[in-house]
Image: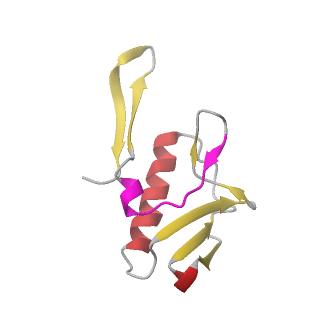
Amino acid sequence: LLSLASRGSGGTGAVVDLSGLSSVDDPLDRARVITQVVRTLVWSGHIERVWFQSENRPWGMGLHDGSVDDGPYDYDHLHGFWLGAGCPDIETVECDRFRALP
């Protein structure tokens, strides 16, 4: 975490700058990073939603159109984080999966 800044009325939003973080290209790993940061900040009681950036560019989950969903992420948004990855050469078997919240 390089910096943390408030955003929005009442300072209930946070912008997290992850510049310098090693490359996180795997969608499951990105979901894990986002979940850990959002859960930590939102559960602190003062932050309600979080935006991400790296090197002054949006950072978050890659979308099908090539853009990046940099947030805002909040507790409700994390309910949609249910990702799975197939095993190499066996598309019908899930080798890794991640669900942000139970």
In this view, the residue farthest toward the front is 9
- Residue 4, relative to residue 65: is it above or below? below
Q: Nearer the viewer, residue 77 or 52?
A: 77
Quadrant, the N terminus: bottom right
Count of marks, rendered view: 0
Q: Residue 4: horizontal and vertical position, in percent?
A: 60, 76
- Residue 87, relative to residue 36: is it above or below? above
Magenta stretch: includes residue 4: no
Residue name at image x 58 percent, y 51 percent: 60
Residue name at image x 35 percent, y 29 percent: 95
Magenta stretch: includes residue 76: yes
Q: Residue 94: horizontal and vertical position, in percent?
A: 34, 26
- Residue 72, relative to residue 60: is it above or below? below
Q: Residue 84: horizontal and vertical position, in percent?
A: 38, 34
In this view, the residue farthest toward the bottom is 10
In the displayed structure image, the side of residue 22 where residue 99 appears, left or right: left
In this view, the residue farthest toward the top is 89
Q: How is the image coloured?
A: secondary structure
In the displayed structure image, the side of residue 13 where residue 101 appears, left or right: left
Residue name at image x 67 percent, y 36 percent: 66
In this view, the residue farthest toward the right is 56
In which quarter of the view is residue 5 placed? bottom right
In which quarter of the view is residue 18 placed? bottom right
Q: Residue 78: horizontal and vertical position, in percent?
A: 39, 55
In the displayed structure image, the side of residue 17 where residue 55 appears, left or right: right
Residue name at image x 60 percent, y 61 percent: 52
In which quarter of the view is residue 82 placed? top left
- Residue 11, relative to residue 43: is it above or below? below
Which portion, as a residue range, is magenta? Answer: 67-78
